[in-house]
Amino acid sequence: MGRAKARLAEAELDALRTQQEPEQELSRTQIKQAMEELQKLGGRLLELKPNELNKVPMSDTLAAAIEESYRIKQNEAKRRHLQYIGKVMREEDADGIRQALALLDSSTKEHQLAFHQLERWRDGLLNNDQATMQDLVSKFPQLDRQQLNNLIRLAQKESRQGKAPTAARKLFKYLRELSEL
């Protein structure tokens, strides 16, 4: 039985289990394009730094395959290993990985929205907005309130004295570390 027929049989079986309509049979071209897209997604994971890679949800198998790829030096071996990563990607949550990559890529809308939220939190804290403080405490239980209050007080003092906003930058950096952006 070919791959397309096997996938159609699996889709029909799943449809019977959930009492839904079976999916249309995918052509070989569609299957190949989907596999190449997963391979490209896996290739994007190889470009990440280790601390960024930790923020991406993935199985141990994929993490081991990515770790293995750093040792490979020959071009043909890299190509084959990238195909293997694409195969492993079939079992992964591709949408979750795409969302994590979008947050890490500063040119995406998701990253920009998260960045603007951090700016709003910083500005709210500097203006002594209690709602902002409550929001942060509820979102991030690991928040160190003493450190946060010290950074706020220092930033407000620098602002009154007309100094460079060093503490405000540190406050922003602390908020970014909390949100893991």
Image: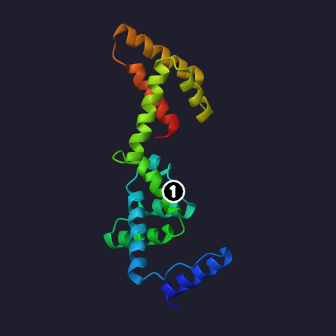
Q: Residue at x 47, y 59 (%)?
A: 67
Q: Residue at x 45, y 57 (%)?
A: 98
| Residue drawn at the location 44% of the way across and 40% of the way down | 114
> Percent from the top left, x then y, of residue 23?
53, 78
Q: Is residue 163 above or below residue 148?
A: above
Is 106 left or right of 7, judged from the image as shown? left
Q: Is residue 42 above or below residue 101?
A: below
* Residue type highlighted by circle 1: Gly
- The answer to whether residue 140 of the structure is visible from this angle is no
Name the residue that disc number 1 marks: 96
Q: Quadrant of residue 77?
A: bottom left
Colouring: rainbow
Looking at the image, residue 181 lies above or below residue 98 = above
Quarter of the image for residue 28 reads bottom left
Q: How many C-alpha atoms fall within 10 Å of the one at disc 1: few (<14), some, or many (≥20)?
A: few
Residue at the spot 49% in from the left edge and 14% down from the top edge = 153
